[in-house]
Each structure stands twice: as C-alpha cells, then as structure tokens.
C-alpha cells in the first residue's frame, strides 16, 4: 500500500508525518525531495521556464526514488507527484495556456512512475497556513526569495487551486482509482493525527 501525504506549506504535513513515524513501525516512511536531491540546483526565481526546469529535477529525483518505494509492502511518502503538479503547475501553465493541458503534460512526463493507492490531503485555510508559516520562521520566503504577506498568500492560493483541481479530477487524469482522504488541517494537530491514524489503520496491508 503506497500512501502519500500532501498539503500546502503551513498545513502541518511534516508535523503529522513525524508523529505517524512514532506510531507505525510496520510502515516504511520516506519523503520528497529525497536526501539525494541537490537543492542548490533549483532555480529560485519564479518564472515559467524555471518551473519547467525544476519540474524535471523533481521528476528525476522521483525516478531514482522508485526502488525504495517499490521495496516495501507499506509506504508513506511525505510529498510526491501531486506536490510537483501543485507547486510547479501554476507557472508552467503560462507556457501551455491551459490548466488541463498543463496537468496532462506533467503526468505524461511522469508516466513511468508508480502512482499512490491513496492520498491523504491536509486541507488548510490559507490564513491558518500563513499564520503557521509566520510562527515557524522569521521571514516569508519561497526558494530563497523574500516575499510579502500578500505575495505569500497569492502564491499559496495558486498552489492550493492546483491541488484542488488535480485531486478533484484525479481519476480522469490518471485513469486509476486513487482514494483521496481529506482531513481538516485547521483542527488541532492531535485531531488531525487521530483521523490520519484511523485512515491508515483501515488501509495498510497487515
């Protein structure tokens, strides 16, 4: 069973995954980008061509990740393909001019990759996510670029819109029945953890 956990920055995703690691010793936990990924190679300036370039970097890292993902019966991955679609899609769309064509192209490039059986999506309100981001770091930034609060909110909104579009049409895009489990990430972390734990317990292979 291959489960990925997704959500915008500030949704509590990494906190949740770290808590789940302490509960499930029969699940292999991994994340993307992997430890092999060279963050220094990322293009930090937000432009369509830089997002295009970054998407290929993440896809190559994901391709190298396949042996690890396929090597265990139960795997939970902190971010996966949906993250690339959500984070790189808004800028790449400026090259294609259409959201659907953008997602279809990104999936075509990724067609050699294993798709998850389930995606747990942490659904956070933008203001809640921004407040958490502000509390967790002094400066608002994206890949090294200093952002104003307005820029950060606009960026998160574009990412969230792509998540919603892709997850809402995932069967049409992937031709696979991928179960989507949404958790209200505005709730306290103990509530989010309780719901995620129950979902996983009902899903993983014993």
Image: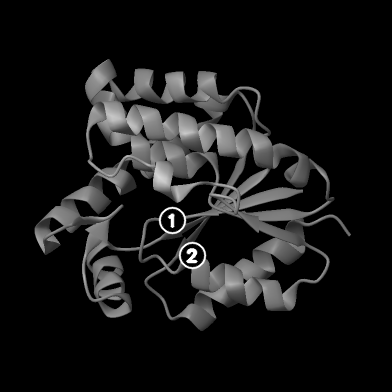
Residue 45 image point, x, y percent = 23, 41
Residue at point 57% right, 75% down?
193
Q: Tell me the SS state at disc 1.
A: loop
Of pointers 2 and 1, the one earlier in the residue sequence: 1
- Within 10 Å of disc 2 (Cα), the crowding (few <14, some 14-19, many 20+) is many
Q: Quadrant of residue 179?
A: top right
- Within 10 Å of disc 1 (Cα), the crowding (few <14, some 14-19, many 20+) is many
Residue 153 image point, x, y percent = 18, 57
Front position in the image: 164 or 67? 67
The Cα–Cα distance between marks 2 and 1, rounded to whole angstroms, is 6 Å
Residue at point 45% right, 45% down?
83
| Marker disc for residue 25 | none
Q: Extreme front residue here?
A: 40
Front position in the image: 69 or 192? 69
* Depicted 57 relative to depicted 147: above or below: above
- Marks 2 and 1: CB-CB under 8 Å? yes
Residue at point 81% right, 71% down?
25
Front position in the image: 194 or 141? 141
| Left or right of 159, for residue 153 | left
Which residue in the structure is indicated by mark 2? 13
Q: Quadrant of residue 187?
A: bottom left
Front position in the image: 139 or 93? 139
* Depicted 107 relative to depicted 114: above or below: above
Residue at point 44% right, 49% down?
39
Q: Tell me the SS state at disc 2.
A: helix
Q: Where is the C terminus found, in terms of image quarters?
A: bottom right
Which residue in the structure is indicated by mark 1? 7
Residue 110 image point, x, y percent = 56, 26
| Left or right of 192, for residue 196 | right
């Amino acid at each position: 069973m291959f489960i990925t956990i997704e959500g915008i920055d500030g949704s509590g995703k990494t906190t949740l995954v770290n808590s789940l690691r302490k509960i499930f010793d029969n699940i292999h936990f991994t994340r993307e980008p992997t430890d092999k990924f060279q963050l220094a190679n990322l293009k930090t300036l937000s432009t369509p061509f830089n997002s295009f370039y970054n998407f290929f970097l993440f896809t190559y890292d994901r391709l190298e990740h396949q042996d690890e993902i396929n090597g265990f019966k139960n795997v939970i991955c902190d971010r996966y393909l949906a993250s690339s679609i959500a984070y790189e899609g808004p800028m790449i769309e400026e090259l294609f001019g259409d959201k659907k064509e953008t997602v279809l192209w990104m999936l075509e490039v990724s067609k050699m990759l294993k798709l998850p059986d389930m995606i747990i999506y942490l659904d956070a309100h933008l203001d809640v996510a921004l407040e958490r981001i502000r509390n967790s770091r002094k400066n608002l930034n994206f890949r090294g670029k200093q952002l104003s609060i307005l820029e950060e909110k606009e960026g998160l909104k574009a990412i969230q819109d792509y998540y919603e579009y892709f997850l809402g049409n995932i069967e049409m895009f992937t031709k696979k029945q991928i179960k989507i489990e949404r958790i209200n990430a505005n709730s306290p972390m103990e509530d989010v953890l309780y719901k995620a734990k129950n979902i996983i317990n009902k899903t993983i292979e014993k």
